[in-house]
Amino acid sequence: MSENTKTKDQKPDTSNRIVWILFAFVVIFIYLFGLTAPLLGPDEPRYSQVAREMFERGDWITPTLGGFDWFEKPALLYWLQIASYNVFGVGEFAARFGSALFGLGTIFSLWILGRFSAAEFFARETTAKHTQIAKNHAANPEFANWLALIAASSIGLIAFARGASFDIILTFPVTASLVAFYIYDLSERRRSAKSGDASQTDFSPVTRYLSLVVFYFFIGIALIAKGLVGIVFPFAIVAFYHVLSWRLPNKTFIFGLFWGTILSLIVASAWYLPMYEANGWKFIDEFFIQHHFQRYTSNKYFHPQPFWFFFGVLPLMTIPWLPFFLASIWSFFKDQRSKLTNQNSRSVNNSTNNYANNSAGKAPRRFLFFPLSSSPLLVFSFAWMLVPVVFFSFSGSKLPGYILPALPAALILTAEYVCRFAGASAKRKRALQFTALLTFFIVAILLQFVVPGFAFKDSVKGLMDTASARGYASEKVLNLHTTSHNSEFYAAGRLVRAEDGKLKKFQGVSEISEEIARQNGKPVLVLVPLEYLEELTSSSLVEAKVLADNTELAIVFVSNK
């Protein structure tokens, strides 16, 4: 009879495990599916072309664009693209493959966090069922699985993990470093508690110290990912977490700041040191002064937004889990308010008793502190989420991707709420899993049938392919009344640039005719917005033959009359 009971109990566990394994395969498929779409916008083609030029030169240090120095960003994305070019050849899939891997790496990091913090999560539950699960948290990956699934199916992570841009390249090492810190912090708190409960079992010394090493190692990686924010965010988040927790870091962590910072700098020096040796002060000026401090303190790069911009963008990145994210924020602050009220009540009672017993008759004093939530993970996630949001809200330049490093924290808060919600019944659990599956299905449909049409309008790949098929594969490419940065990748080596290396924007047909003359009369290809097409085709200076258009730009074969 005991064997039958055991078999009956195991069946749901086996079925549940299979469901989560299938989800893991679906996630991997979705994150690698559709990466061959044309490169979109201005950034993907530029970054992919920078990596291509480094790849063709065999140079892993100095980024260039069109043969000119390009010091806007550090090298980690380019390294991933160069490695992919070596394996898959130069193309869209290779350009985005590293970003997809870093998206999966972010999900895996959060899954690891869920495994280590499962006991803390279940400790918040009061039912006998969850108490029993908490005692066996090492064998129960439910919270970790929900956290990974919520993260993988959030629209923000799906979108940015598909782009050849630096936002996801920064988000993964920042996430990995903060997960490592929290594991270290968790191990120290459990060690200090010295409890005999299974959920409070100490970590081994190897785990404690290795997690601290990993924290600093990934800070070094984050520095190569996107510059100084790679070290500012982890340190600021950890400091804010200790402030909210109203406790000082332990001696081990304080001592680790010295050797750990050195370790981070040694890792980062893999690129920064040879880059400085090769380019000197020019690198310092362009990379740090112009593209760090001036970008943050001014609108030099033309991306102004209101102060509250990121407070609106971050919640949208949690779709389809937005209602649960908002509910988790409400629950968090409601919990803090309740604890603050109870704490103040106890403080007043204690002060009144002390006052009654105080012969000197001094007035009682009240101490108001930020009340620590019953879950340090929630406080840590709140600190993690708030630091990037506030930091970039003061920036003079704002783009949605800037806030991506805060998304994992928002997803932790969301997953904690979702997991408790799903634990109430099997129907809820299946409904939420179906929501994630439906999200993946919709994403796959969009990637297969919608994104290609959008990419056709946004990218010049189709225009350049048409020109090549018509026999115009080597002519110079000019931009008339526009600056198509998308052409950096698809017309590489053929674009006409100004003296400072930027794409030259021709302002009229006469300038086009003069450029043809400078090219010894050789015909050129011209990219021109459709509203200016007639100016080119009706000109008495040149002969123009329209080859194709993508509903926004036309590509025209032009020669002097």
Image (cartoon, rainbow, N blue to C red):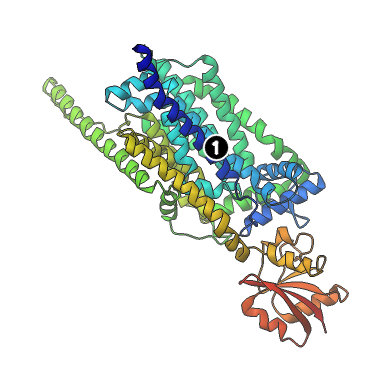
Residue at the spot 71% in from the left edge and 58% down from the top edge? 489
**Observer able to see residue 174:** no
Q: Position of residue 79 (x, y in %)?
A: 70, 42
In this view, the residue in front, 321 or 36, is 36
Residue 520 picture quarter: bottom right
Residue bearing the label numbered 1? 25
In this view, the residue in front, 168 or 249, is 168
Residue at the spot 46% in from the left edge and 38% down from the top edge? 149
Residue at the spot 78% in from the left edge and 56% down from the top edge? 67
Q: Position of residue 368 (x, y in %)?
A: 27, 33
Q: Is residue 58 left or right of residue 201?
A: right
Number of other residues with Cα within 10 Å of mark 1, as a class: few under 14, some 14 to 19, many 20 or more: few
Q: Position of residue 325 (x, y in %)?
A: 37, 44
In this view, the residue in front, 522 or 301, is 522
Q: How many numbered dots are placed on residues in this image?
A: 1
**Observer able to see residue 304:** yes
